[in-house]
Image: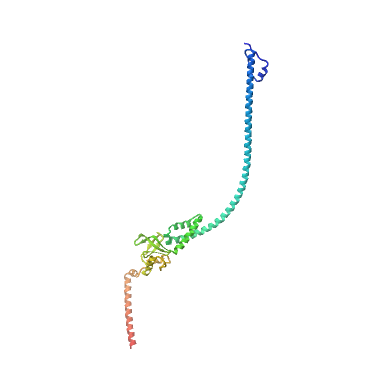
């Protein structure tokens, strides 16, 4: 086999770093070189096309990056302007907050003073409310007055309004005559639910008898000893009346005088308390009265005889 090397393409092949050995005739070697050259041209064209496409993509990416950069810069400027506005607004809000806080401290101080007065007033009225028979009709107000008197924090406006309403209601109910249901204790401790008549916060009556209010149990008690019949007749008239004015004996001490009436013994009870000594004293007293009467009659007789002479 003969080997032939085309001297004309040697420099090109060596410049490409290729070592090609041709076999066969010179025509075959020339055809092979032509194919190689065509392939190189085709590859060059393809590579050039790919490079241009790559450059186009790079340029497109560059333009996109520039747009994004411009948008980012514009957004940065907008945020900087917004930041300046927010800083100014923050300064304004801080000044307003300080002014509002000063006003709040001033008014809170006034409210705390008011709350101290309310607590003291609530403590004073708590005992009055507990002893008042009006509480039997409105038992929930005792818990509210206790809360106001013992509260450690500033109450709401609604609490203040309710406190004023409770004080006002006590004043109003003191001047009213109301029929209401209540538990009455009578006899040896028996209880019954009855309709009673409350005369203000002074007296309560039921079935023609006076009642007293016991704050300890929140119930009414029937007096074991009632006043004289002339007073009880006024009680019966009040229970039977439907309108207008009716005379009634009111205990202004809110039951204290009636309670003392129970403790005050009657004449027969006082005599019984004296025992034998009491009976002897009464006997001697009666004998003394008889002797005095006899002496008086004798003196009258003697006086009449003297006047006759």
Quarter of the image with the C terminus in it? bottom left
Residue 17 or residue 61, whichever sits in front: 61
x then y, percent, for residue 306: 33, 87
Q: Is residue 124 visible?
A: no
Quadrant housing residue 202: bottom left
The extreme bottom residue here reads 309
How many numbered marks, from 0 up? Answer: 0
Residue plotted at (63% across, 36% down):
67
Quarter of the image with the N terminus in it? top right
Q: In the rendered image of this protein, does residue 106 appear above or below residue 1?
A: below
The extreme top residue here reads 1
Residue 227 or residue 150, whichever sits in front: 227
x then y, percent, for residue 117: 51, 59
**Left or right: where does residue 91 sit relative to residue 190?**
right
Quadrant housing residue 64: top right
Residue plotted at (48% across, 59% down):
165
Q: In the rendered image of this protein, does residue 79 appear above or below residue 254?
A: above
Residue 156 or residue 40, whichever sits in front: 40
Residue 59 or residue 194, whichever sits in front: 59
Q: Is residue 103 visible?
A: yes
x then y, percent, for residue 20: 63, 16
Residue plotted at (33% across, 79% down):
293
Looking at the picture, the colour scheme in use is rainbow
**Left or right: where does residue 236 sit relative to residue 153?**
left
**Left or right: where does residue 204 sit relative to residue 1?**
left
x then y, percent, for residue 239: 38, 65
Q: In the rendered image of this protein, does residue 221 appear above or below residue 267?
A: above
Quadrant housing residue 196: bottom left
């Amino acid at each position: 086999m003969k080997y032939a090397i085309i001297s004309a393409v040697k420099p090109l092949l060596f410049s490409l770093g290729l070592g090609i050995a041709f076999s066969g005739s010179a025509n075959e070697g020339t055809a092979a070189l032509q194919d190689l050259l065509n392939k190189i041209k085709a590859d060059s064209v393809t590579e050039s096309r790919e490079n241009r496409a790559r450059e186009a993509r790079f340029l497109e990416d560059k333009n996109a990056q520039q747009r994004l950069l411009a948008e980012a810069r514009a957004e940065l400027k907008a945020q900087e302007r917004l930041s300046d506005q927010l800083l100014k607004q923050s300064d304004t809000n801080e000044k307003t907050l300080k002014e509002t806080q000063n006003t709040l401290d001033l008014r809170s101080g006034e409210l705390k003073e008011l709350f101290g007065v309310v607590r003291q007033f609530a403590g004073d009225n708590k005992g009055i409310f507990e002893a008042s028979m009006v509480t039997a009709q409105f038992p929930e107000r005792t818990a509210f007055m206790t809360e106001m008197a013992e509260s450690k924090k500033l109450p709401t406006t609604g609490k203040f309004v309710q406190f004023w309403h409770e004080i006002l209601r006590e004043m109003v109910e003191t001047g009213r005559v109301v029929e209401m249901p209540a538990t009455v204790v009578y006899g040896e401790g028996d209880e019954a639910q009855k309709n009673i008549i409350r005369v203000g916060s002074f007296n309560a009556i039921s079935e023609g008898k006076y009642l007293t209010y016991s704050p300890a149990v929140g119930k009414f008690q029937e007096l074991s000893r009632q006043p004289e019949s002339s007073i009880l007749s006024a009680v019966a008239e009040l229970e039977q009346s439907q309108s207008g004015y009716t005379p009634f004996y009111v205990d202004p001490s809110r039951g204290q005088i009636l309670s003392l009436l129970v403790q005050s013994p009657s004449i027969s009870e006082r005599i019984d308390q004296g025992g034998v000594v009491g009976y002897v004293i009464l006997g001697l007293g009666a004998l003394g009265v008889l002797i005095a009467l006899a002496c008086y009659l004798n003196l009258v007789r003697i006086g009449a005889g003297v006047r006759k002479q």
